[in-house]
Amino acid sequence: MDFKNEKLLRQSATMGGGRARKPNPYFALVAQVALAVAVILVFCVQMVHVSHSRRFYADAPIATPLRQYYSNGYLIVSSNGGLNQMRSGICDMVAIARYMNATLVVPQLDNTSLWQDPSKFEDIFDVDHFINSLRDEVEIVKEIPQEMQQIQIQLEMEKHLSMPPRSWSDISYYTDQIAPERLKKNKILHFEKTDNRLANNGPIEMQKLRCKANYNALKFTSPIEKIGSKVVKILRDKGEFLVLHLRYEKDMLAYTGCNEGCSVEEADELQTLRYSVPWWKKKQINSTSTRLQGLCPMTPEETALTLRALGVNRKTQIYIAAGDIYGGKKRLASLRAAYPNLVKKEKLLPPYELLPFKNHSSQMAAIDYMVSLESDIFFPTYGGNMARLVEGHRRYLGFKKTIQPNQRALVNLIDKYRKDLNWREFEAGVKKAHANRYGNPVKRRVMPEKPKEEDYFWSNPQECLIL
């Protein structure tokens, strides 16, 4: 601590007119009080800083102890899909590596899918934070050590390196089969896919680790967080806002085979795209029957009707978290007419601020993910990966309001409304269909014999929630 002020105080009390004089007791008391107040203020400022740091970095890596264990080998994983499919897969791989006593290599992201995004892990996530915040669970390295690279090449040549793990597998599949038969034997193992490779249900310790990886370890990079926070501030300064995850995008319509509201030419274009993507297995799809089952993304027109029926105020800011809407401004006309305060990040920010993220769809999606978490209401129009992960993350943050559309009921009601159902009946029907679909606490449905049909873990990570 600096005592210069106290020294000057003593000097001033003993000097005056060239001769010493007795210190003024009153002056000394005032000075001591001032010094004490200054010390208290400094202490308070430091505590505020520490508190602020804990708020955003509750799992600060400096305090995370290192887990000591004998590694059975290195696990390399190639994530597949868009940002949120990769995100959930990475968290599953953290748990799998932990239970196999493997050393995890920082995951590789999908650069070859439809979006052709060249982003690496460290372009989207804070890689050092990821490694350090999980060091008490699993060792994570940025790359295979040089002395192991020759073994990796040899295994690749012999086709013993890579494999796609089985979908919806219990953790015992990895500990009892994969670890002894592949990892321990070869010391390096490469998983070619990460999507849905771990069952929804399992030991509670494993579930909590999945949550830790998702909600603590996967922290976006500073540039992404900065832009995301700026968008949130712009919206928040104007009041409440709803994030609309409007999945009426070309790739999603082509994938699902849905063409509601499209022209014949547009429907043909979507079908051509679907047939051109080899990893989309289902090619012949009946759009009408798919929609009646509630399996199509809602159209902008259907979305506007639903939001109105649910009582969303016309003046509400609606932020569209999505890529380019198929059909452009023309297709959004009815939604904008119902909700004129319709915005996207491209409208809120000057072009130069988004330029570093251009042609990087996963980084753009990361910005939308941040805004979605901070919104007053989140409304997804299709139950895809982002919709499910954001829903679960918002539950984790305190059951923030998330409207889960009952799409089968909505299609039925909307079609009736377009024929002869009056508005009052339509509105009542929509509200009834969504009475318990606001992201409130519920138990996941468990179906041990049909793991694919169970309620999705990432939509409702109940083992990690404070009820």
Image: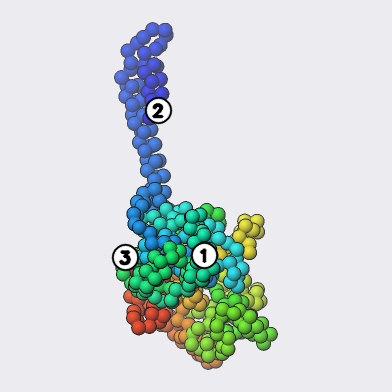
Q: Residue furthest top?
A: 19
Q: Quadrant of residue 11?
A: top left
Identify the residue shown where x is 35% and y is 21%.
27
Point out residue 227 in the picture as x, y percentages from the top left corner: 55, 57
Q: CA distance from mark 1 to mark 2?
A: 63 Å
Check whether the beta carbons of the residues at disc 3 and disc 1 lie within 8 A of each other.
no
Q: Quadrant of the N terminus?
A: top left
Identify the residue shown where x is 49% and y is 61%.
151
Label drawn at residue 258 = none
Tell which of 209 and 416 is nearer to you: 209
Question: Which residue type does callout 3 highlight?
Answer: Glu
Give the residue at mark 3: 205
Q: Is residue 6 above or below residue 368?
A: above
Secondary structure category for the residue under label 3: helix
Can residue 107 be seen in the rendering of this structure?
no
Q: Quadrant of residue 354?
A: bottom right
Could you tell whether 271 is left or right of 428 in the image?
right
Label drawn at residue 154 = 1
Q: Earlier in the sequence, mark 2 or mark 3?
A: 2
Check whether the beta carbons of the residues at disc 2 and disc 3 lie within 8 A of each other.
no
Can residue 363 be seen in the rendering of this structure?
yes
Q: Residue furthest right?
A: 265
Q: Earlier in the sequence, mark 1 or mark 2?
A: 2
Q: Is the residue marked by circle 2 packed among few (<14), some (14-19), or many (20+) residues within 10 Å?
A: few
Q: CA distance from mark 2 to mark 3?
A: 49 Å
Give the residue at mark 2: 2
